[in-house]
Image: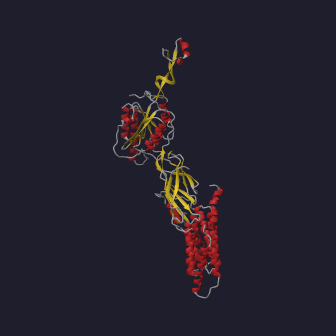
Amino acid sequence: MSAPRALTAAAPRLAAVLLGAACVAWTAVPPRNTGLAALALVVSIIAVVAGALRLALADVPQPEEGFFLTAPVRAWLTFLAVLRGLPWEEIAVVALLWLEVQHPAKPWHTAALGFGLAAYLLAVHIAESGAPAGRLLRRQAKVLLAGACLLALGAGFAMLPAAGPGAGSALLRVLAAAAVVAAAALVLPWRD
Amino acid sequence: MAGPVQQVEVRWRPSRHARRLLTLALAGLLLATLTRRPELVGVAAPTLLLLGVAIPGRPGRPGRPGRPARLAVRVGLASSRLYEGELAAVDLAVDDTRFDTRWLLEAGRGVEPASATAVNGAAARFEFTVPRWGRRQLGSAALVLHDPWRLTEGRAELVLPAVDCYPQPAVERTRVVLSRLPNRLGEHAARVPGEGTEFAGVREYVPGDRQRAINWPASTRLGRLQVNTFAAERSQDIVLVVDATSDVGPPGTSALDLGLRGAAGAARAYLDGRDRVGVICYQWGGARWLAPSLGRRQFYKIIDTMLSADAGWGRGETFSRLPRAALPPGALVVVFSPLLDQRFVETLRDMRERGFGLIVVDVLNTVPPPRRTFSDAMTRRIWRMEQQAIRFSLRELGVPVVHWDGSAPLDLPLAPYTRRPLVVHR
């Protein structure tokens, strides 16, 4: 493979890895020493690294016949099977969101994480499917823009002062935000 | 691209990307409810919006014709017949171009994929080779369709056709010619005078000779009219016998592989020389044979007959006397065999006793592996001596036995018998 082609193939993978690492770093700071937060951080790091390894080793072929293999080869194949079998990106997303809610983070911080996670998932998809990134993003531009507006709307709702003290008012805010997001999604002209 | 159209069923399902987005959305909504933080609803919003765009509809529903339940796929095979190691290609094309398409080839057993062109498009080309002769299923092709949002994917499988892989014919440019040829017009110079083009000698003129045949220098020298004589041109019957009773050696260079390649090369060489060529595949359970005939078509018929050769032990009855219809009188019999089976050797002896001119091409290129124990070494030695005895006994009967390793041209071992006509003592 020529150098420009290799770079073209490696660029989306590198972008996915960098976005995953950025999401982990964004969520981990400031560090918290509670047990659940530390566990979520470890799980998210493992998941992002494993996802990056899966993308890096995507072109390694699986042998057709698995008979009479040596122990190192068998271990390598098991490692590949685990790497390719588990949904690492889903695990990373859940762990990062859980880590985020462990922090007393500001709404804009969470909104930025939302942007980062969406971009991470999109980069992973482009890297593993080989889809042309430019064409894919052009097709989804309107929807992504509308989604960004809704994300900002959700963050804005979180910044409004609560109507009154107590758990009930906070839940009411969540429901209101969800209702506004749903209503906005329904009226937006996103269909082709 | 020409090719038959196959209707394939498409199974639609959410893509892996969609499942990831759904995970993000559900996790955001759940955590928003549990922690009462509305900004997490915002995190879920873009992904929910994307998923809403690509709500999977039922395939083929009238309101949503975007995801068809069936698709027309064209499959074009460059050639359904190819030789061992020859590069061939299969073209695949889908008529519906609304989707991002990706083709995957699952090569069948004994088929080696070579390269692929435009696998991310509506029309793709897969090149392949078949390293060993036989009838091979090409395998299957998977067609993966993505909607413009890449959130649903359709998958269709289609079974690719089979190809016949012919043994790669051995190189043979020279031919063994019998000393006594049947009285049939051909290209081999016979020992009798005739109307051919090869100069045979000079004789005295007799009334009735053509004037243009007069040899004027000889006539001037001798003082009497002399005419040139020419050799008659005859064709011969060739019967190729392939011993498929045992297949020893590594796959690809086994005795049967070499036998078939040698027989294919010989068939081509003799058919090019306007000889009538037939074939007998000797195997357990009976022999498959094809009576001698002429022409290019006969070459493919011979190969098709040989493709049915199947080595195996102890299946059905066998016989030591080959059918009379497969062996025309006066034919030259070229045998390709590892000479491992005693009953086949008896068949050769029988043919020799019936007066056929025989040449045996020995295609055995493997020996039992060396062992350390005394009994194994002794067994190996006895086996070697037995093999030598078989070959010696055939030579004593007047049957030439030449060894061919499969890599050199077949002309090389046959050289002593192609330089002059083969005399058969009856």
Q: Most extreme residue toward the left, as rendered?
A: B317
Relative horizontal placement of residue A157, taking residue B264 as reference (left or right): right
Relative horizontal placement of residue B160, taking residue A24 as reference (left or right): left
- Residue B91 pos. (x, y %): 54, 51
- Residue B395 pos. (x, y %): 41, 33
Q: Residue at x 39, y 37 (%)?
A: B390
Q: Residue at x 62, y 85 (%)?
A: A162
Q: Is residue A55 above or below residue B85?
A: below
- Most foreground residue, A28 or B82: B82
Q: Is residue B369 above or below residue B326?
A: below
Q: Most extreme residue toward the bottom, as rendered?
A: A165
- Most foreground residue, B116 or B382: B116
Q: Is residue B242 above or below residue A43?
A: above
* Rendered-image quadrant of the C terminus of chain B: top left
Residue B22, picture quadrant: bottom right
Is residue A155 visible in the rendered image? The answer is yes
Q: Residue at x 59, y 54 (%)?
A: B118
Is residue A106 visible in the rendered image? The answer is no
- Residue A92 pos. (x, y %): 57, 71
- Most foreground residue, B155 or A63: B155
Numbered circles on residues, count: 0
- Residue A97 pos. (x, y %): 58, 75
- Most foreground residue, B271 or B358: B271
